[in-house]
Image (cartoon, helix red, strand yellow):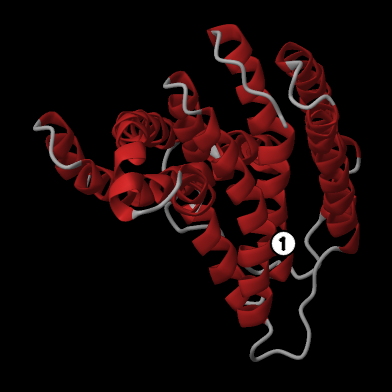
Amino acid sequence: MVPVSIILGLVHASPTWVFLASCLAILPLAGLMGEATEHLTHHVGPGVGGLVNASFGNAAELIIAFIALRAGETEIVKASLTGSIIGNILMVLGVAMLLGGWKRKELVFNRLAAESGSSMMVLAVVSLVIPAIYAQGTGHQRPKSVESISLDISFVLILTYAASLFFSLKTHKPLFASEGEDPAEEPPARPWSVRASLLVLVAAAALVGVVSELLVHAVDAAGHALGLGKVFMGVVVVALVGNAAEHSTAILVAMKGKMDLALGIAMGSSMQIALFVAPALVIAGHLMGTPLGLE
């Protein structure tokens, strides 16, 4: 679908068709990026592999949001980030628990990892709510102050995210071992080489960037044609497209009884978006002259 979406964009086809083709094109690319990251993890070890997964797990979402931010579509950016966080915690985790426990009496997961993730999400929610409360309290009369507060909080959130990675991947790594991990489980018989994994990762990311450009420019007109507002398009459509690979992976591993991994994917993705992706976009918007507040 990638060539189709590009051709439709070049011939200035209907924005609705361009948008739909772009969405369908991003889905396999997101899955390919996830697969390349997984293969790369087998070569660099679990510690660095965890960092690689943390860095590239939401790459498609970050690219789409960055393109939208560059185009000045701040409403789409906020909506897609909100939809990603809510979708991962509620929909994906809920479906994973439902299907994972459908034929099992109980599902096993690491309690400490779940508690740590929950605590980080509470911290993220409180941090994201502060600018909104300030903006509401001032009647949105001080946008510069809201931007300044958002920028300060963004640096704190990124540092917090870095500290959480150091805590879980370095200092207290044994405590985060999977409760339901099968020691006999082997990695793929022939994992991709480091070079092949990196090439696929970079190529897929580049294609996601190209297709995202088409998607962002068509989202407004497509929304009008379909009778959907920007908020709905961002919260539901764009968020689902950007996180499609993680959604399917979390549900599939839960169906195999690996609830610990499913919980880590769903909660980890939301935590990464709240603590890293959103703050990074706020900082990027400040540098590009496109203010993006956390309110």
- Residue, x 54% and y 70% (percent of image)? 252
| Nearer to the camera, 134 or 285 | 134
Kindly identify the amino acid type of the residue bearing the numbered disc 1.
Leu
Image spot of residue 106 (x, y percent): 78, 85
Is 64 positioned to the left or the right of 279 in the image? left
> In this figure, which residue is indicated by the disc labeled 1?
263
The part of the image, by quadrant, that contains residue 195 is top left
- Residue, x 71% and y 66% (percent of image)? 183
Is 176 positioned to the left or the right of 99 in the image? right
The part of the image, by quadrant, that contains residue 283 is top right
| Nearer to the camera, 270 or 185 | 270
In this orientation, does residue 157 appear?
yes
Q: Is residue 202 above or below residue 118?
A: above
Is 157 positioned to the left or the right of 69 in the image? right
| Nearer to the camera, 44 or 226 | 226
Helix, strand, or loop for circle 1?
helix
- Residue, x 79% and y 14% (percent of image)? 145
- Density class for disc 1 (Cα within 10 Å; few <14, some 14-19, many ≥20) is many
Is 69 positioned to the left or the right of 204 in the image? right
Image spot of residue 215 (x, y percent): 33, 37
